[in-house]
């Protein structure tokens, strides 16, 4: 029997996925430029700055212009890319870091999520790109634009762990100098693999010993008190150390 041709719906979905990936790539290039060039080197900001308020007529004094203080220097930005298969907990990780309550249930990211977190010396921009199969093709286009990669893995998803390993090593090969933080999430589940098993199954023991690759345990839950577990704090502290 001859194979049935693809239906119009399947073709439409494939075309939509390709368009979405192209839009993501264009937006990223617009924000971050090419190569290792940073936005602060070009004097640009991710979002447009708010226009200053003009003084009222009775507030304005020409002599004040001579004593104006110099404008405060803008903080430098650091970029962190958050990747992983769909359902690993990337969106929840970003929400917990930004102080927002986690969403109930699993809501896949079809595009990207972002959050900006200020520190004393710089601002950290974290960008999450969806982990569905039709978006993973574009991951490698972004790794050369960031300072640190966070790769989130579902420790209890034994069936898809080989896929996570394959995608992780593609990214490792793309940029040999990029620091990588692998988050073994959902360690609180009974079916979760141990950290020793995670290291073996992800092939981290074969990574060059000179490379900065870290494996951290976490239990970032969609809801409940465990969403504030210490693992998230440890990940954030490590990111600050790598970005400083």
Image (spheres, helix red, strand yellow):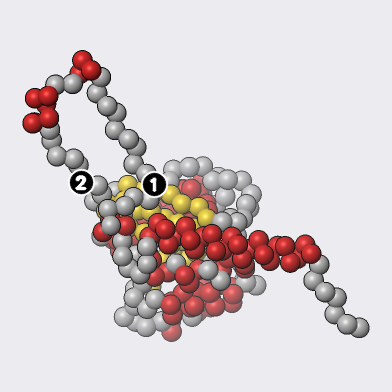
Q: Which residue is mark 1?
A: 47
Please identify the quadrant where the N terminus is shown. bottom right
Q: Residue furthest top?
A: 58
Front residue (pair 164, 13): 13
Q: Is residue 157 left or right of residue 128?
A: right
Write down the quadrant of residue 231 in the picture. Answer: bottom left
**Would residue 235 be seen by someone viewing this image from the given angle?**
no
Q: Earlier in the sequence, mark 1 or mark 2?
A: 1
CA separation, marks 1 and 2?
Answer: 16 Å
Q: Which mark is residue 73?
A: 2
Residue 123: horizontal and vertical position, in percent?
Answer: 31, 51
Q: Which image quadrant for residue 71?
A: top left
49 vs 190, nearest the viewer: 49
Residue 67 against residue 217 in the figure, above or below: above
Q: Is residue 16 above or below residue 96?
A: below
Residue at position x 55%, y 64% from top?
22
Question: Which labelled disc corresponds to residue 153?
Answer: none
Residue at 62% across / 72% down in the picture?
A: 160
Label 2: which secondary element: loop
Relative to residue 166, is residue 97 drawn left or right?
left
Residue 59, above or below 181: above
Dot 2 surroundings within 10 Å: few (below 14), some, or many (20 or more)?
Answer: few
Cβ atoms at labels 1 and 2 below 8 Å apart: no
Q: Of residues 26 and 149, which is closer to you in this image? A: 26
Query: How far across and how far down the image is residue 168, in percent?
Result: 49, 74
For the point 54% across and 59% down, the residue is: 23
Q: Residue at x 74, y 66 (%)?
A: 11
Residue 38, percent across and down?
Answer: 31, 61
Viewer can see residue 201: yes
Coordinates of residue 70 in the picture (x, y in percent) = 14, 39
**Where, quadrant-wise, is the C terminus in this rendering?**
bottom left
Would residue 132 be found to the left or right of residue 67 on screen?
Answer: right
């Amino acid at each position: 029997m001859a194979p049935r041709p693809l239906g119009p719906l399947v073709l439409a979905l494939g075309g939509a996925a390709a368009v979405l990936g192209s839009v993501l790539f264009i937006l990223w290039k617009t924000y971050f430029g090419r190569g290792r060039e940073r936005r602060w080197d070009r004097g640009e900001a991710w979002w447009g700055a708010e226009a200053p308020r003009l003084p009222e007529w009775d507030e304005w004094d020409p002599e004040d212009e001579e004593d104006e203080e110099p404008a405060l220097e803008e903080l430098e930005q650091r970029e962190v890319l958050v990747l992983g298969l769909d359902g690993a907990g990337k969106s929840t990780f970003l929400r917990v870091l930004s102080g927002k309550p986690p969403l109930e249930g699993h809501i896949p990211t079809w595009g990207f999520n972002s959050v900006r977190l200020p520190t004393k010396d710089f601002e950290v921009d974290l960008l999450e790109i969806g982990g569905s199969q039709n978006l993973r093709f574009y991951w490698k286009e972004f790794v050369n634009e960031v300072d640190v990669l966070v790769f989130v893995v579902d420790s209890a998803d034994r069936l898809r762990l080989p896929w996570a390993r394959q995608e992780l090593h593609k990214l490792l090969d793309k940029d040999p100098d990029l620091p990588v933080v692998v988050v073994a999430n959902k360690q609180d589940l009974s079916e979760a693999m141990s950290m020793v098993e995670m290291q073996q199954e992800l092939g981290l023991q074969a990574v060059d010993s000179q490379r900065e690759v870290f494996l951290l345990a976490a239990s970032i839950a969609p809801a409940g008190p465990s969403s504030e577990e210490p693992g998230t704090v440890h990940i954030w502290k490590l990111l600050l150390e790598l970005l400083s």
